[in-house]
Amino acid sequence: NAGVTQTPKFRILKIGQSMTLQCTQDMNHNYMYWYRQDPGMGLKLIYYSVGAGITDKGEVPNGYNVSRSTTEDFPLRLELAAPSQTSVYFCASYTGGVNIQYFGAGTRLSVL
Amino acid sequence: TQLLEQSPQFLSIQEGENLTVYCNSSSVFSSLQWYRQEPGEGPVLLVTVVTGGEVKKLKRLTFQFGDARKDSSLHITAAQPGDTGLYLCAGTNTGGFKTIFGAGTRLFVKA
C-alpha cells in the first residue's frame, strides 16, 4: 500500500518557469490537500479538494492552481515561478471523520 | 483568521528530562492533532484529541485538549534521543476538513 506519493522529490526552477507537482493517493480518500512548509515554520494550506471536480483555496493560494479530475490525483501547478515559492511542498489525503491526514514525503522546490 | 501558537519554538534537553510543549489559539476547534516530523519526511500523526478535557497517552507521551477546545499540550516523560524531531500541532475547523498548523517545536534530546 503506497499511501500518498509525490513526484518529483527535488526540483530547481528558474524564475518565470512553470511546473506541475504530482500527487497520487491509493486509499480512495475524498479529501486532498496541498501545503507548503517554509524553513522553521509550520505548514500553510495552499489548496484543498473535497472530491473529484471540487477544489477551493486555502490560506496561501496566490501563484498556484490545482485540478482534481480523479479521486486519486491532485496536481499542483506553478505557472510563473518566483523565488518566494521556494519551499517544501506536501500533499496529504484524508478519509473523513476524525481527522487523520496522511502525508506524502514532500517535494523540495528551489526557484532561482 | 485562525492561528495556532506553539511554544517553545526550540527546546534542547538532556536524556531523561521531562518537557511540555504548548499549543494555544483564540479559536475553537472540532479536533486537534499532534504530528511528529523527521527531516526530509512528511508529518506523521501521533494523536487526535476531540473532546474538551480529553487526555490521551502514548507510551511516554501525554496529550491534553483544553476544556474549551482552544488549546492543547504535549508532555514527554523521560525524553530519549529518539524523541528528537519537529512536533507540530494542528487544529481542524468545525466543518471538519480544513486544518491549520502551528509553527512547530523543534526538540533536541542529547544523550
Image (tube, rainbow, N blue to C red):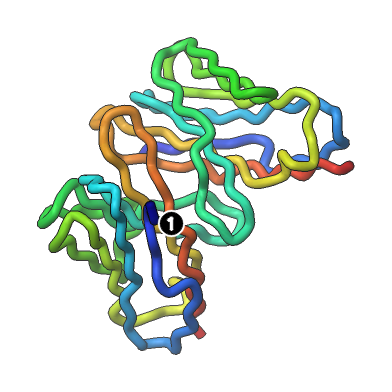
Q: In this orientation, does residue A14 appear?
A: yes
Residue appearing at x 45%, y 22% in the figure? B49
- Name the residue nearer the viewer: A10 or B67: A10
Provide residue B60's location: percent of width, then percent of height.
69, 24
On the image, numbered disc 1 is attached to which residue?
A: A104
Residue found at the very far front of the displayed protein: A1
Residue appearing at x 36%, y 40% in the figure? B99
Provide residue A58's location: percent of width, then percent of height.
30, 52
Whether A71 is drawn above or below B103: the answer is below
Q: Give the quadrant of the N terminus of chain B.
A: top left
Provide residue A80's location: percent of width, then percent of height.
32, 82
On the rendered structure, is A22 left or right of A50? right
- Name the residue nearer the viewer: A53 or A42: A53
Q: In this orientation, does residue B75 appear?
A: no
Name which residue type carries label 1. Gly
Q: Give the quadrant of the C terminus of chain B.
A: top right
Residue appearing at x 30%, y 65% in the figure? A62
Q: Quadrant of residue B105?
A: top right
On the rendered structure, is A10 left or right of B93? right
On the rendered structure, is A39 left or right of A85? right
Q: Residues within 10 Å of mark 1 (few under 14, many from 20)?
A: many
Whether B93 is drawn above or below B10: the answer is above
Subunit of label 1: A
Q: Quadrant of residue B62?
A: top right
Residue appearing at x 18%, y 54% in the figure? A71
Provide residue B27's location: percent of width, then percent of height.
39, 27
Dot 1: what SS?
loop
